[in-house]
């Protein structure tokens, strides 16, 4: 199934190029009082929401997806966890280009570990990217985004996919410079998720997904998740060995080679097989 969040926080089920408004399915969510539970409550209750949404969708009128403004499928992720330099060819291109590494130490992912991005950087495809610090180079990075579905700590590689709720196309936007990754990549709108939350059963194995990105129709990045240094099961296990994972937490799995600069007025199209395509406009902040 494909869940969309659109407009003024409407919930939709997407089939082909049509979306059906199933917002009333959210009425099945439990009532909470402060302090709120950790995690994204839609993802935590996805099984219940899914059943109710299917029933509502039978009577809901379809609208073209192109007619709605797509938001991030996740409203309240607790953590945005990112994997640096997780494709060998991207690691090689960063090491070879001072405009990318700025004389920072470049280590393999097993030495660098993972890093966190601010949740305030999160937007959807319809929100677009608002470029800040226009005097500096800012690059696109397409990544498979893994959405955690249940609380998990020290999950094994063999069991890792059982805690995954679904997947999104992700863009990890990066302003280049000498600062720490988490600082440079946490600017408002520099994490884009979309176009939908695609449930894990629909995607199947995440280890063989083609992905590509164009800017203004020019192909910039093309690869396959089979080229990841640490695949999805390894990343989930690795992250959960340091953090307790909660429903709605996101793991951005890393970007392949071909990263390049973006500018106001550009249009990015990012596609991952069985997950979807999102079109994202770039503007000045």
Image (cartoon, rainbow, N blue to C red):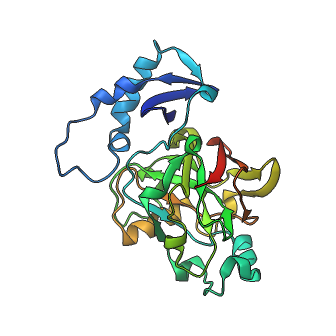
Q: Residue at x 35, y 23 (%)?
A: 24
Q: Quadrant of residue 223?
A: bottom right
Q: Residue furthest top?
A: 59
Q: Residue furthest right?
A: 218
Horizontal side of 111 relative to 95 (left or right) equals left
Instruction: State whether residue 57 is above or below residue 145.
Output: above
Horizontal side of 108 relative to 89 (left or right) equals left
Horizontal side of 188 relative to 106 (left or right) equals left
Instruction: State whether residue 101 is above or below residue 4.
Output: below
User: Whole-percent x and y of residue 92?
Assistant: 74, 77
Q: Using the rendered image of the protein, determine whether residue 271 is visible from the camera's viewpoint.
A: yes
Q: Residue at x 17, y 48 (%)?
A: 34
Q: Residue at x 67, y 50 (%)?
A: 209
**Residue 144 vs residue 33, the one in the foreground:** 33
**Residue 90 vs residue 127, the one in the foreground:** 127
User: Whole-percent x and y of residue 3?
Assistant: 49, 34
User: Whole-percent x and y of residue 8?
Assistant: 43, 32
Q: Residue at x 57, y 55 (%)?
A: 285
Q: Quadrant of residue 110?
A: bottom right
User: Whole-percent x and y of residue 95?
Assistant: 72, 82
Q: Quadrant of residue 14?
A: top right
């Amino acid at each position: 199934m494909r869940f969309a969040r659109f407009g003024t926080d409407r919930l939709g089920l997407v089939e082909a190029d049509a979306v059906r408004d199933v917002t009333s399915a959210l009425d099945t969510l439990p009532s909470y009082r402060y302090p709120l539970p950790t995690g994204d409550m839609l993802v935590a209750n996805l099984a219940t929401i899914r059943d109710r949404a299917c029933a509502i969708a039978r009577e809901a009128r379809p609208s073209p997806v192109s007619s709605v403004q797509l938001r991030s499928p996740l409203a309240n992720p607790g953590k945005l966890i990112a994997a640096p330099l997780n494709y060998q060819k991207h690691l090689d291109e960063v090491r070879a280009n001072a405009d990318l590494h700025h004389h920072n130490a470049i280590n393999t992912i097993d030495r660098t570990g993972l890093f966190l991005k601010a949740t305030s950087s999160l937007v959807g495809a319809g929100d677009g990217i608002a470029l800040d610090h226009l005097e500096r180079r800012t690059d696109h990075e397409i990544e498979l985004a893994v959405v955690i579905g249940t609380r998990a700590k020290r999950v094994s590689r063999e069991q890792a996919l059982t805690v995954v709720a679904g997947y999104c196309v992700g863009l990890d936007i990066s302003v280049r410079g000498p600062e720490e990754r988490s600082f440079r990549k946490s600017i408002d709108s520099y994490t884009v998720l979309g176009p939908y939350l695609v449930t894990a059963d629909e995607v199947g194995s995440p280890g063989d997904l083609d992905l590509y990105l164009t800017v203004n129709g020019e192909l910039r990045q093309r690869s396959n998740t089979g080229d990841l240094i640490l695949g999805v099961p390894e990343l989930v296990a690795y992250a959960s060995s340091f953090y307790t994972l909660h429903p709605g937490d996101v793991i951005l799995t890393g970007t392949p080679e071909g990263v390049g600069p973006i500018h106001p007025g550009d249009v990015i199209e990012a596609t991952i097989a069985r997950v979807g395509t999102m079109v994202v406009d770039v503007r000045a902040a």
